[in-house]
Amino acid sequence: MDTLLLARLQFATTTSIHFLFVVVTLGLVTLLVGMQTAWVLTGNPKWERLTRYWGQLYVINYVLGIATGIVMEFQFGLNWSGLSRYVGNVFGAPLAIETLVAFFLESTFLGMWIFGWHRLGKGVHLALLWGVAITAYASAFWIMVANSWLQNPVGYEVRDGIAHLTDFGALLTNPSLGMAFGHVVSAALLVGGMLMAAVSAGHLIRRTADFALFRTSLRIGLVTAALAITMVQGFGFAQFGPVGSVQPTKFGGDSLESQALIAEWTTRFGPGDYTPPVLASVGLGFMILIGFTLGCVWLLLPLLFRDWIIRLRFPLWLILLALPLPFIAVILGWISREVGRQPWVAYGLLPTEQAVSPVSAPLMLASLIGFSLLLGTLAVTNWVLLARHARRGAADPALGRPPAPPSEPAHPEPALI
Amino acid sequence: MDLAWYALLGLFFASYLVLAGYDYGVGLLLARGGGPAGRREALTALGPFFLGNEVWLVAAMGILFGAFPLLEGELLAGCYPVVVGALVGVILVTVGVQLRSRPSHERIRARWDRVVVIGSALAALGWGALLAALLQGVPLEADGHVAGVTHLATPFAAAAGLAMVTLVAVHGATFLTLRLPAEAAATVGRTARRLVPVALTAVALATVVGLLSARVRDAVQRPAVAVLLPVLLVTALLAAGAALTRRRPGWALVATGAALALPVVLVGAALWPYVLVSTTDPGASLLVADAAASAPTLRLLGWVALPLLPALLGFQAMCWWVFRGRTDGRAPVYW
């Protein structure tokens, strides 16, 4: 096994785990914003309970999103030092902006939101959640700017073998960015909606307490999923045009454009295999299949009338069993986008083999095994905890639990000095 | 421009060590006994600040990648095992602290707390050793790559790692002295005072080993600054000890915080104008100016960072203000 393959496997593993958590984060936070806003506007305690229950699941899920995200950020330097050496001037900028503009604030806001129940004013507390959601979307945007640059490098010039930034605006108008960002964000909404609908369906099947609560979240989840799947399909198919024009080899090397491009690369970089592994197209095919299957969510919407969906029961089972589908689809979609970029790390500019760090294979293997075991174990533990808390119901989530009655003065004394 | 970004990188990494330093310190102190109630108390004191502390690391890494791409690759890949050690520590702490209260069995919570203890130790060891690796130079070859990772296995790196563990432990104990309810604070205050001499010993040991190391002597560009580092560290620790004795935990925390920020600032200053000093080929040493991204990138990032910094600091300050004061029965509990 060579270092390159091991480094690629490690990145694929970390990214896949990361992606499974961040789509849930992005999808759920959007729905949470709606619920908490409804609570503040109407004062109906039902919305507070919904916010606490789904908020707790959101917060548990968030943990692994951060943990895997930090590992990914370090991996660029650890395993892909050539990436920072040759294209860091351009590729590094959106990543740096992401950490400063988005993640820094997102996590700071979230910390205050988690601990701010019963301590901050309702308006401030709601504003914090809005802040979390807005910065989460900003985060997704800047990551997609960086990723789109790898798919289709723009706005740079090469001097002495190193890429320098010439036009940052070009990164933002990159043809491989717009539709892909829409696609990813709608996919996150789809995952969030499906998760909400499936967990609610589980409670309604078991006829647990809080019928009214889970009836509401089932409806919210289903409607969100239906709207989102349509957007996912729209943005997905809209990508074929731009991707086909800027990355002709992504869908195989048969088209005329691909062959012209491969001929050009062969003269510039020497002979080699410039078509991506078949895995990319297979992933794409299955993802589209799942996308069409999930489109059937629309067929369930009429059953919301007079709660037929709950009375018939079998639709609830369908929703519950369909929960893995959107997760599988996002991973397949990601594989098709990233594997389809091979053998380039920055398409047509930097071959993947030049980007890998000059680290010995045994060290890379140890790191691969170590991080895969660590993150894999943590991910499974996290899902078990999520499932348990989802199952436990909305009786008394730890998030937003009112403090014990005051036995001491309510105003803490300032302790500095 | 390069210097400004280098200073900003230092500011973010130093802030990370100061703020997450007490996370790791509190994490280490989970091992001191006191039962489930004692650990609950310590984590409640930490609670609201935890998420806002580790973001400084992520932002520092973002600045490192955006403004110093060349350094990012060579530093991280060249110090692979140490960085991975610190990283695993950071992951274990972040996951352990946030998930430990989700299971309801005390036995499982105690297991998670052990994960936090191990993670805190790893993170502190790793960052201490990384700073030592900078100070002792790396085998940077003429092709711009660091050769191998065996250059890390030195007594100095080990001593610096251990010193960092003791520094975060003092820092964490001081933080708890400031945050816990008065009775509990008195107990942990005694722990903090007892830890001060331990940290002094560890710093002295690292200093002696460093002075004896020919690599450190060769790599350091400004010996006066390098000598200032242990002197100021000892001063800060003595000040922290004195403040703790006079029951001024606020000032003690300022002093232990300074002890965590100083190594970053002084390692950077002692190596200036270099950032990576080569032990094998003096001509291959990496200047800060050469490690920095090219001018258009720095200009762009400058326009982003300049208006943003007040907002970042402002929201952090809001968090500290909202949750100021000692914890009591009404303190919000989540993890």
Image (cartoon, coloured by chain):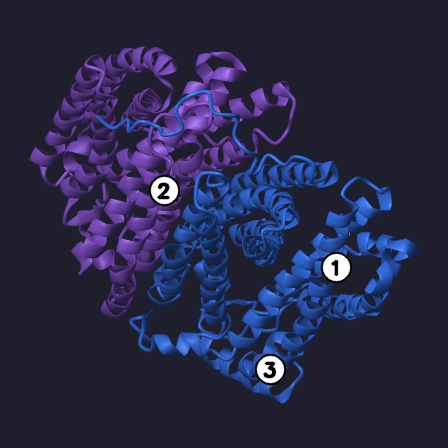
How many C-alpha atoms fall within 10 Å of the one at disc 3: few (<14), some, or many (≥20)? some
* Secondary element type, mark 3: helix
Residue flagged by tag 1: what amino acid is it?
A: Arg
Instruction: Where is residue B107? Give x, y as percent.
Output: 62, 18
In terms of secondary structure, where does tag 1 sit? helix
Of all chains, the one bearing label 2 is B
Secondary structure, mark 2, is: helix
Q: Which residue is mark 2?
A: B319
Identified at 21% across, 20% down, the residue is: B248
Which one is in front, B178 or B167?
A: B178
Type of amino acid at the residue the image marks with label 3: Gly
Mark 1 and mark 3: span between their CA atoms? 38 Å
Pointer 2 and pointer 3 on the same chain? no
B18 sits to left or right of A105: left
Colour used to depict chain A in the structure image: blue
The residue tagged 3 is: A244
Q: Please give left or right for residue B291 compared with residue A315 in the image.
A: left
Instruction: Out of A123 and B274, give the one closest to the viewer.
Output: A123
Residue B144 shows up from this direction: no
Q: Residue shown at 51%/45% (left/top)?
A: A361
Chain letter for the purple colouring in the rendering: B
Q: Are marks 1 and 2 in contact (CB under 8 Å)?
A: no
